[in-house]
Image (cartoon, rainbow, N blue to C red):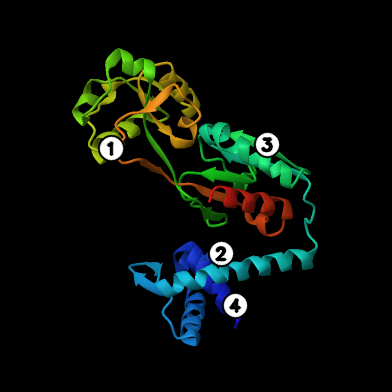
């Protein structure tokens, strides 16, 4: 099989559109489209459904993608071996993540990484902004939105989730809410952009909340969690952090959890630095 056709399919499947894949491969969009069509013709199957300007994998396309990803990994490993560039697995890798992920998700993973690769050092950049890895503020970023820069390599990991939690002391003092209407009288702890949080809870989830409910807020997820633990109010807490504390309990578990997408992103050095590639793949494995 023609590797160029396989590569065109892989890039298109990962990017979700011909235009984004063409930028990644530095090809024109018509050229890439012809390569994908040629692969479909040679295999005799339809790989993508065209939905507006987007491409959606067919069941056959999803099945093929599993095998093609292995081929892509093997091809990149071969290129690294042949070039002899950045073969050392020693040195520093900077990982950017939100403060809650940096505090509660990364440390146990880094312990496992050290057991596998003791020569690698890691600097964690705890930031609730979107660190610009193109400016080398970090080598790898763990983000909760899909990176928009076309020069970045991104991979979607398993989603996390968050729920409403409160301290046992708060529930003892104010009672446990049993119905959605009960939340209108509750105190809440907010974080980062509180107005946006209120809009999501009220308009998308139908909770009877306003800014008046949010008597407490912080520009840090970790600080907001500590406020919840002190019994100041109810808060939206990421599952991995909540599971570490016995003094907070889930409130109204019948509510749908809040989905938190998890993306890994890195710059083009992923293809030439074995050290960064190793940590990137390790995080992708550990995060699902």
Between the C-alphas of marks 4 and 2, the distance is: 14 Å
Residue under label 3: 123
Between the C-alphas of marks 4 and 1, the distance is: 50 Å
Q: Earlier in the sequence, mark 4 or mark 3?
A: 4
Percent coordinates x, y for residue 60 in the rendering: 43, 75
Between the C-alphas of marks 3 and 1, the distance is: 39 Å
Residue toward you, 210 or 101: 101
Quadrant for the N terminus in the image: bottom right
Q: Is residue 171 left or right of residue 128?
A: left
Residue toward you, 21 or 188: 188
- Give the foreground label among 3 and 1: 1
Query: Residue at horizontal 54%, vertical 47%?
Result: 287
Q: Does residue 22 appear in the picture of this structure? A: no
Disc 1 crowd, CA 10 A, few/some/many (<14, 14-19, 20+): few
Q: Is residue 31 left or right of residue 45?
A: right
Residue under label 1: 254
Residue under label 2: 24
Q: Is residue 53 above or below residue 88?
A: below
Query: Residue at horizontal 21%, vertical 25%?
Result: 182
Between the C-alphas of marks 4 and 3, the distance is: 37 Å
Disc 3 crowd, CA 10 A, few/some/many (<14, 14-19, 20+): few
Q: Is residue 81 above or below residue 106?
A: below
Query: Residue at horizontal 56%, vertical 40%?
Result: 131
Residue toward you, 243 or 216: 243
Q: Is residue 254 above or below residue 267?
A: above
Q: Earlier in the sequence, mark 4 or mark 1?
A: 4
Q: Quadrant of residue 25?
A: bottom right
Percent coordinates x, y for residue 98 in the rendering: 52, 36
Percent coordinates x, y for residue 120 in the rendering: 75, 43
């Amino acid at each position: 099989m023609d590797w160029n056709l396989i590569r065109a399919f892989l890039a298109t499947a990962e990017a979700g559109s011909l235009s984004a894949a063409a930028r990644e491969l530095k090809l024109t969009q018509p050229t890439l489209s012809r390569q994908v069509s040629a692969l479909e013709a040679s295999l005799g199957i339809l790989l993508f459904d065209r939905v507006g300007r987007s491409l959606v994998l067919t069941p056959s396309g999803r099945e093929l993608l599993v095998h093609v990803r292995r081929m892509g990994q093997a091809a990149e490993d071969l290129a690294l071996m042949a070039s002899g560039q950045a073969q050392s697995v020693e040195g520093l890798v900077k990982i950017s993540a939100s403060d809650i992920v940096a505090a509660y998700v990364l440390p146990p993973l880094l312990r496992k990484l050290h057991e596998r690769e003791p020569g690698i050092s890691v600097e964690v950049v705890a930031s609730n902004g979107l660190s610009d890895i193109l400016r080398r503020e970090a080598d790898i970023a763990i983000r909760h939105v899909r990176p928009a820069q076309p020069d970045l390599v991104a991979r979607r990991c398993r989603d996390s989730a968050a729920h409403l939690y409160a301290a046992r002391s708060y529930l003892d003092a104010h009672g446990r809410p049993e119905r959605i209407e009960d939340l209108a009288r509750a105190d809440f702890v907010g974080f980062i952009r509180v107005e946006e949080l209120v809009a999501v809870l009220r308009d998308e989830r139908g909770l009877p909340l306003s800014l008046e409910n949010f008597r407490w807020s912080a520009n840090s997820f970790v600080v907001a969690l500590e406020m919840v633990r002190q019994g100041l109010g109810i808060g939206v807490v990421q599952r991995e952090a909540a599971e570490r504390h016995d003094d907070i309990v889930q409130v109204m578990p019948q509510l749908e959890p809040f989905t938190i997408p998890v993306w890994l992103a890195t710059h083009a050095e992923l293809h030439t630095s074995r050290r960064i590639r190793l940590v990137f793949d390790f995080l992708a494995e550990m995060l699902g």
